[in-house]
Image (cartoon, helix red, strand yellow):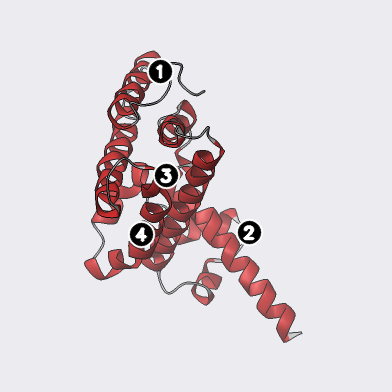
Amino acid sequence: MPRRSAEAKAQTHAQILQHASQVFRARGSGVGIGDVMKDLGLTAGGFYRHFESKDDLFVKAVSASLIEIAERLEQVALKAPKGRELEAVITAYLSPDHLRHPEAWCALATLAPDVSRLPSAVRKQLDGAMQLYQGKLSKFMPGASDAERGQQFLILFSGMAGAIAMLRVLSDKAMREQALSMTREYYLTTFAPGGSKKRLD
């Protein structure tokens, strides 16, 4: 019985974390603990058996989403034709799907301002996820050394995340998607100029 109880607790913990990751990306950090738990049919009181506080859940949820997107984009790169890995990553990140579905994509494009307001000690908990994100994708960046490729990663991904965040502000769908297309072509030309003139779908 204790073993089954521990397994059930671990499953519930993972369920809360996964749902919170999606909800925070979709609706921002203002979503309350009660709302997250209610969505799952759980009581708010049970939350504290799994997380110390809302900040604890928020940071862990953002970390989980960063790891998720890093692994997804790494797979996108590995499946691309040789020499076109970065082109595939940029195309996937600056996609209409990412623009329309914040709940399923990069937390940096939705939650960076919220994270920046957290105390430094709390933000430090994200360091591991950010390092994993950079580690999985910087190998596809241009550069003559690991340090240079790491710098290119920071420049590229901060720019792409900011672009997605800004474009979501636009209410005109046609204008938004035209701007996304121009932004994507800019980053492709700047960071992956060796790709084919016929871009990857």
Whether residue 107 can be seen here: no
**Contact, CB < 8 Å: mark 1 with mark 2?**
no
Q: Amino acid at mark 1?
A: Lys
Whether residue 99 can be seen here: yes
**Contact, CB < 8 Å: mark 4 with mark 2?**
no
Going from the N terminus, do you reach mark 2 or mark 3 first?
A: 2
Disc sitting over residue 41 in the figure: 2
Q: Secondary structure at mark 2?
A: loop
For mark 3, what is the residue? 106
Relative image position of residue 194 (x, y in whole percent): 36, 26
Which residue is depicted at the point 40% across and 30% down? Answer: 94
Q: Could you tell whether 94 is left or right of 170 in the image?
A: right
**Contact, CB < 8 Å: mark 1 with mark 4?**
no
Q: Outermost residue, right direction?
A: 1
Relative image position of residue 69 (x, y in whole percent): 47, 47
Mark 2 surroundings within 10 Å by alpha-carbon count, few (fewer than 14), some (14 through 19), many (20 or more): few
Q: Secondary structure at mark 4?
A: helix
Relative image position of residue 191 (x, y in whole percent): 30, 32
Q: Amino acid at mark 4?
A: Gln
Disc 2 to disc 3, C-alpha distance: 27 Å
Disc 1 to disc 2, C-alpha distance: 35 Å
Disc 3 to disc 1, C-alpha distance: 21 Å
Q: Amino acid at mark 2?
A: Gly
Q: Could you tell whether 186 is left or right of 68 in the image?
A: left
Q: Amino acid at mark 3?
A: Cys
Disc sitting over residue 131 in the figure: 4
Which residue is depicted at the point 34% across and 33% down? Answer: 164
